[in-house]
Amino acid sequence: MKLSNKTKVLEQGEMTLAERMYLPAIVGGMATTLKHFFSKPVTIRYPEQQRYLGPIYRGHHILKKDEQGAERCTACGLCAVACPAEAISMVAEERKKGEEHLYREEKYAKVYEINMLRCIFCGLCEEACPKEAIFLRHDKMVPVFSTRDEVIYGKDKLVENMDQRYLRDGWK
């Protein structure tokens, strides 16, 4: 039973001697190989060479400090609420007398943790922060993990080192 009367009969012509010996296919393949052989390679030697990631790359997280070295984070929790992967957790505590040089506000994050296995590097935490305390660096990748203990980033890995300040165009 035919569904339609639109049939097309194809007839295959006789192959030439060159086609029977696959010469056109071999020559075409060799031409492609030689073209790629003499072109510039697109790969880089990664550990020695680092590729420029661009200004909009979202990489390693960092908790910023102000010019005096005090932490900017006030543990408001807006970054944790904005995180769609629920990767950020924190514990807030009030600043004690004598700690004015360590924290800008009366409240600070005693514990600030990011689960890097859950983080999707969307940048919503960076946008939600009213104090510009958290940034996703555009010049540094997150290192490879070898054990599960290394995936939880606490304040020891996140807080900015004053000797190596991270500066982004237009930000302090």
Image (cartoon, helix red, strand yellow):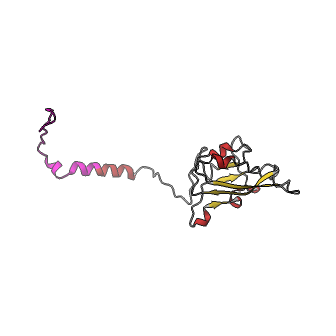
Horizontal and vertical percent position of residue 35: 36, 49
Displayed quadrant of residue 12 = top left
- By secondary structure, the bulk of the magenta-drawn segment is best described as loop
Horizontal and vertical percent position of residue 10: 14, 39
The foreground one among 132 and 14 is: 132
Q: Is residue 170 above or below residue 105?
A: above
The foreground one among 89 and 169 is: 89
- Tell me which residue sits at (63%, 61%) in the image: 152
Q: Is residue 169 above or below residue 118?
A: above
Horizontal and vertical percent position of residue 106: 82, 50
- For the record, the magenta segment spans 1-28
The foreground one among 31 and 85 is: 85
Q: Residue furthest top?
A: 5
- The quarter of the image holding the C terminus is top right
Asked if residue 27 lies in the magenta stretch, the reply is: yes
Q: Residue furthest right?
A: 98
